[in-house]
Amino acid sequence: MRKILLLGGTSEASALAGCLAERGENAVLSYAGRVSQPKAQPIPVRIGGFGGVPGLVRYLQEHHVTHLVDATHPFATQMSRHAVEAAQQTGIALLALTRPPWRAGPGDRWQAVPDMAAAVAALAGPPKRVLLALGRLHCAEFAAQPQHHYILRLVDAPIEPPALPHHTVVVSRGPFGVSGDLALMRRQGVDIVVAKNAGGVGAEAKLHAARSLGLPVVMVERPPIAHRREASSVAQVLEWLDHSPGARDAVRGV
Ligand code: 3Y8
Ligand code: NAP
């Protein structure tokens, strides 16, 4: 019997989870447990780290997983590295479901930077109103540029105030829409946006809004990620499931 472990946390993972549920697949979606109420899913969910590569190997073996799908975020590089290592150690089939990076188009005013430290450095200069659309983890790094007023878009309200002297917290989870992001940027008087090159559709609204308003964007490029087999659509994942070893145990139509 085929058993799929889906490493989630992205719009693509949710789309795949829906298809797996419709096909009656034996699948579990895994969240890291980074937010208080992760999105409900139509397949069973597990929440929390595995305990490094050994923990993931143990989980795969104890739960008789036959297929591992890594649909985590392009910046979730440690999880993806662990998935590659655990798949090598167990011989379990691994496929990553990912999405291409965004590319600047006509009208975009992007400054591409290689990492978060370079994004901080790019903000040197007179005070501005900065939309930090990076989530909770990276706010503190921007204390090196305290002159700005930061608009922080977070999934959960922060437990303690961020270490930024001038800031406004906006608690909101995506996927986001262009009209909502335009309204946010106008309401908050945003001068510049800082974003990760996440790709996908769930976070790109802010780029369309910035373009419409003629705002510059500091774009943090993706970190290098472990080499693995990749798919760029749910259909490719389903094709892989049906034609990879273990497929003979596919769920029979009922
Ligand atoms: C916990 C689980 C779905 C998945 C939706 C996508 C889209 C909306 C846009 C902005 C950018 C950001 C952030 C963002 C987006 C999707 C996707 C995506 C960016 C949830 C979710 C979890 C997380 C973790 C969270 C991080 C944070 C990053 C906010 C769920 C809602 C900035 C990334 O407070 C924290 O600790 C938040 C941490 C990792 C980045 C960071 O470093 O802080 N995502 N986001 C997952 C887990 O526990 O395993 O859906 O409830 C998922 C989504 N967030 O099914 O529809 O597909 O990317 N998530 C970024 O891309 O820059 C917000 O504000 O414009
Ligand atoms: P990360 O830095 O690559 O991973 C750190 C540790 O978190 C992993 O070693 C693992 O812990 C645990 N972990 C990560 N993803 C997990 C998952 N899906 N299921 C179980 N454990 C997981 O990961 P991250 O960047 O913090 O991302 C965490 C989650 O948020 C992921 O699900 C990711 O898809 C989602 N997300 C991240 C971003 C982002 O910008 N980073 C954006 C949107 C969504 P152990 O070592 O204990 O196993």
Image (cartoon, grey):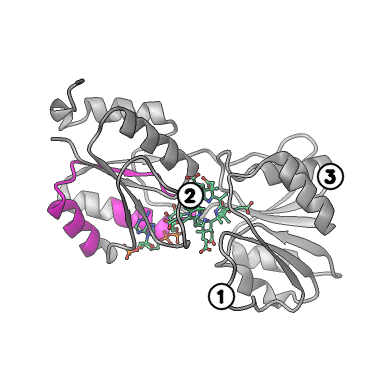
The residue carrying mark 1 is 159
**Which of marks 3 and 2 precedes in the sequence?**
2
Sort mark 3 into few (<14), some (14-19) or many (20+) by Cα contacts within 10 Å. some
Q: Which residues are magenta?
A: 54-83
Determine if the magenta segment contains residue 182. no
Q: Nearer the viewer, mark 1 or mark 2?
A: 1
The residue carrying mark 2 is 74
Give x and y (percent) for residue 146. 75, 77
User: Of helix, strand and loop, which one carries label 1?
Assistant: loop
Asked if the residue at tag 3 contacts the one at tag 2, i.e. Cβ–Cβ closer than 8 Å, the answer is: no
Q: Nearer the viewer, residue 69 or 222?
A: 69
| Location of residue 197 with respect to 240 vertically, above or below | below
User: Of helix, strand and loop, which one carries label 3?
Assistant: helix
- The yes-or-no answer for disc 2 within 8 Å of ligand 2 is yes
- Residue 8 lies left or right of residue 155; in this view the side is left
Q: Amino acid at mark 1?
A: Ile
Rendered-image quadrant of the N terminus: top left
Determine if the magenta segment contains residue 56. yes
Residue farthest top in this picture: 253
Sort mark 2 into few (<14), some (14-19) or many (20+) by Cα contacts within 10 Å. many
